[in-house]
Amino acid sequence: MDGMKAITIPEFGSADVLRLDEVEIPEPGPGQVSIDVAYAGANFAEILYRQGVVDVPLPFVPGIEVSGRVRALGPGVEGLRVGQPVAALTIVDSGGYAEVVTTSADLVAPLDGYDLGLGIAAALPSNSTTALLVLDRVARIEPGESVLVHAAAGGVGSQLGQAARLLGAGRVVGTVGSAAKIEKAEAFGYDEVVLRDQVAEAGRFDVVVDMVGGTTRRTSLDLLAPMGRMVVMGNASGAEDVGISANEVWFTNKTVSGFNLAAFSAAFPAEAGRALHRAVAAAASGELRVQVESLRLEQAAEAHRRIESGRTTGKLVLEVERV
């Protein structure tokens, strides 16, 4: 068989289980493309795969987003060409921590005509696309509304503040877990950044995006203004699930929604792809700024450790191909 390098999860566990292996090169099926990967984004989602929180078959190649060049087109694919530089969501079947990956053509955004390096482009498909979908499609933000984003210095948090501005928000506030991250988060479109344990003093909000969970989720619901919407899209704290009373949201005119990019991309690939195209254009125009740090593919375990420890600000990407 033709082989390639890939990071695999041979068993569930700590970052130490990640292994650089030789695996078979995938071929695109109908409606798919294969991509020679230049960079793969490193995300909290891949940690959940590695920990066994998400039930995946082992051995498993993680990796929910990439940049690179189109390698081959599957049957029925139009509008893309071999050799074309692209950014892509690989979140439905994963596999981005590898030299070659396949994904639906709907989840691929050409980079032609944009002044974007492939390192930056790899940081857009997950976080920037999520930010636009969460605020526009799920929260249905209206011009002038106030927005609160937890974990504002992280990869997706850094995009949510800017996306809120792009979509016409009024007051945009972020929270962080430590004082050291306040200045970092302030650079990403926030009017104000506060420590998470002091957020109760920040007032009321029309939209709250919670990736943290635990007590933060309960506080977030309390901070919603009447007709406010909270979007749940993570549990970075690792806390037990928080029960929310249906009667409470009924009596207080509040809405709680969930967003999962993998499930959304599987159910609505064309819509996810349109949001990715929008993210690429916004990054190229400067409306969305991404702070990127690069590690080598074989340093995937170190990338996971940094994300798990909360030491990251902005985005980590793994360099797969020397470019």
Image (cartoon, rainbow, N blue to C red):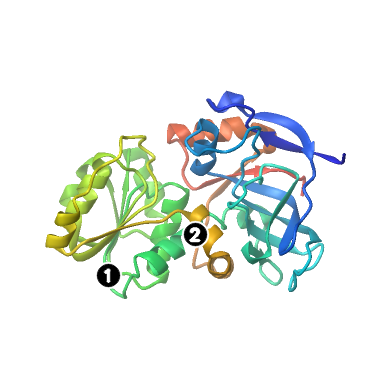
Left or right: where 243 falls relative to 239: left
Left or right: where 250 falls relative to 262: left
Spatial CA distance of label 2 from label 1 is 25 Å
Q: Which mark is residue 264?
A: 2
Q: Would you call the spot at circle 1 few (<14 residues within 10 Å), some (14-19), or many (20 or more)?
A: some
Which residue matches tag 1? Answer: 145
Residue 72 in sight from this viewpoint: yes
Mark 2 or mark 1: which is in front? Answer: 2
Q: Measuring from the top left, give residue 196's x and y in whole percent.
A: 27, 43
Q: Measuring from the top left, give residue 13's x and y in whole percent.
A: 53, 25
Above-or-below relation of 169 to 313? below
| Count of marks overlaid on the render | 2
Q: Which of 100 and 123 is in front in this view?
A: 100
- Whichever of labels 2 and 1 marks the residue nearer the N terminus, that label is 1
Above-or-below relation of 289 to 240? below
Q: Would you call the spot at circle 2 few (<14 residues within 10 Å), some (14-19), or many (20 or more)?
A: some
Q: Quadrant of the rendered structure where residue 207 is?
A: bottom left
| Quadrant where the image shows the N terminus | top right
What SS does tag 1 mark? loop
- The amino acid beneath tag 1 is Glu
For the point 67% across and 58% down, the residue is 117
- The amino acid beneath tag 2 is Phe
Residue 283 in sight from this viewpoint: no
Q: Quadrant of the rendered structure where residue 5 is?
A: top right
